[in-house]
Amino acid sequence: MSTAANVSTGALQEREMLLGEPIPWSDRHLSPENLKALLLARLPVQPTGPDVEQLFERLGLEHPGRQGGLIQATVRAPRQPWWLPTRPYWLLSAFVDGDDRVTEFKVQYLSGI
């Protein structure tokens, strides 16, 4: 399992603290790393594909879906400058292996420019 998808036992206290924090989707200062930490805290220590799918459903994310070993969903991010042609969004991606274990979890901010 990639360290990106694994919450070490030394971080269990931090995980419990993050689990209680709401996800500030509209905060302009939310970084991909912070969002990733908040999402991983809501998953088991060794997450599986169904765990990720359930999380995306529970959070009510847009366009959740799975295609083979890739599970993705999107979330609208706060609009930055008024002149941007498209609204920015977060792209959340989990990659799973043949045993349906998460091997990588990515959070990307996409602005459309």
Image (cartoon, grey):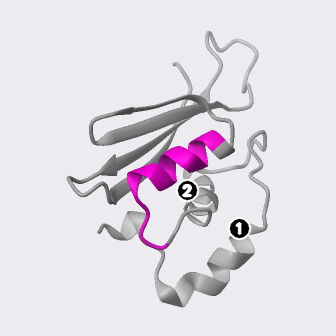
Residue 109 versus residue 3: which sits nearer the camera? 3
Q: Residues within 10 Å of mark 2 (few under 14, many from 20)?
A: some
Q: Which image quadrant is residue 80 in? A: top right
Looking at the rendering, the stretch of residues picked out in magenta corresponds to: 45-57
Q: Which residue is mark 1?
A: 19
Q: Residue furthest left?
A: 98
User: Is 89 a magenta residue?
Assistant: no
Which of marks 1 and 2 precedes in the sequence? 1
Q: Which mark is residue 72?
A: none
Q: Is residue 74 left or right of residue 59?
A: left
Viewed as shown, does residue 106 lie left or right of 76? left
List x then y, in percent, for residue 111. 56, 26
Question: Percent x, y for residue 88?
Answer: 62, 25
Q: Is residue 52 left or right of residue 69?
A: right
Q: Nearer the viewer, residue 25 or 110?
A: 25
For residue 62, above or below residue 84: below
- Give me the residue at 69% from left, 77% from top: 16
Whole-angstrom CA distance, mark 2 to mark 1, is 12 Å
Majority secondary structure in the magenta region? helix
Q: Estimate the x, y position of residue 55 in percent, counting from the top left.
A: 59, 49
**Residue shown at 24% from the left, 58% from the top:** 99
Q: Position of residue 19 (x, y in %)?
A: 71, 67
Rendered image: mark on residue 36: 2
Report the mark closest to the observer, 2 or 1: 1
Image quarter (top left, top right, bottom left or bottom right) of the N terminus: bottom left
